[in-house]
Amino acid sequence: MGARVVWAKGLPQRGRYYPGIDVIVLRHGMTERRTVSTLGHELAHMYYGDPLCTPAANRRAWRWAARLLIPDDEYAAAERLYPSPGAIAQTLGVTIDVIRAYQKAP
């Protein structure tokens, strides 16, 4: 998508998208699952051109990230094996935020 991704130590939030310059900053030191999930979320903000991080924009970004990161067949297989969203998230290599958004997506 053309974004430049950089990592920053001590970033108060997990990630941040800077519109206009297409830079995504991720907190250094997160787990791989959290990094992948956060990057998907911030890419959604870039895709939609979100100038502000409102609750509605965040919900939409998590849904977009879920569609990006979770293939339907892999989700179905994980759900058959595991009853909890946390176990499904771990199996699929994403955070529970992504799983919850996937489950609520139309």
Image: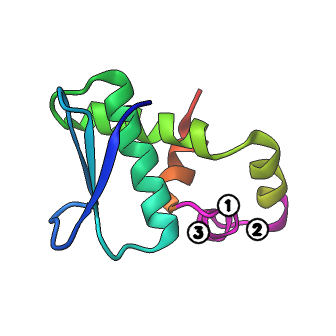
Please rate how many residues cluster around mark 3, counting C-alpha atoms within 10 Å: few if below 14, some from 14 to 19, many from 20.
some
Residue 29 x/y as whole percent = 34, 76
In the rendered view, does 2 fall on the left or right side of 74? left
Please rate how many residues cluster around mark 1, counting C-alpha atoms within 10 Å: few if below 14, some from 14 to 19, many from 20.
some
21 or 67, which is in the foreground?
21
> In the rendered image, which residue does mark 2 sit on?
82
Q: Report, in whole angstroms, how far the alpha carbon at label 3 lies from the one at label 1.
A: 10 Å
- Mark 2 touching mark 1, by CB under 8 A? no
Magenta stretch containing residue 43, yes or no? no
> In the rendered image, which residue does mark 1 sit on?
92
Q: Nearer the viewer, mark 2 or mark 1?
A: 1
Q: Residue at x 73, y 66 (%)?
A: 83
Quarter of the picture holding the C terminus: top right
23 or 87, which is in the foreground?
23
Q: Report, in whole angstroms, how far the alpha carbon at label 3 lies from the one at label 2.
A: 9 Å
Q: Residue at x 78, y 60 (%)?
A: 78
Magenta stretch containing residue 90, yes or no? yes
> In the rendered image, which residue does mark 3 sit on?
86
The mark that comes first in sequence, 2 or 1, is 2
In the rendered view, does 74 fall on the left or right side of 5? right
Q: Report, in whole angstroms, how far the alpha carbon at label 2 lies from the one at label 1.
A: 11 Å
Quarter of the image holding residue 59?
top left
The stretch in magenta equals 80-94
Label 2: which secondary element: loop
80 or 43, which is in the foreground?
43
Quarter of the image holding residue 62?
top left
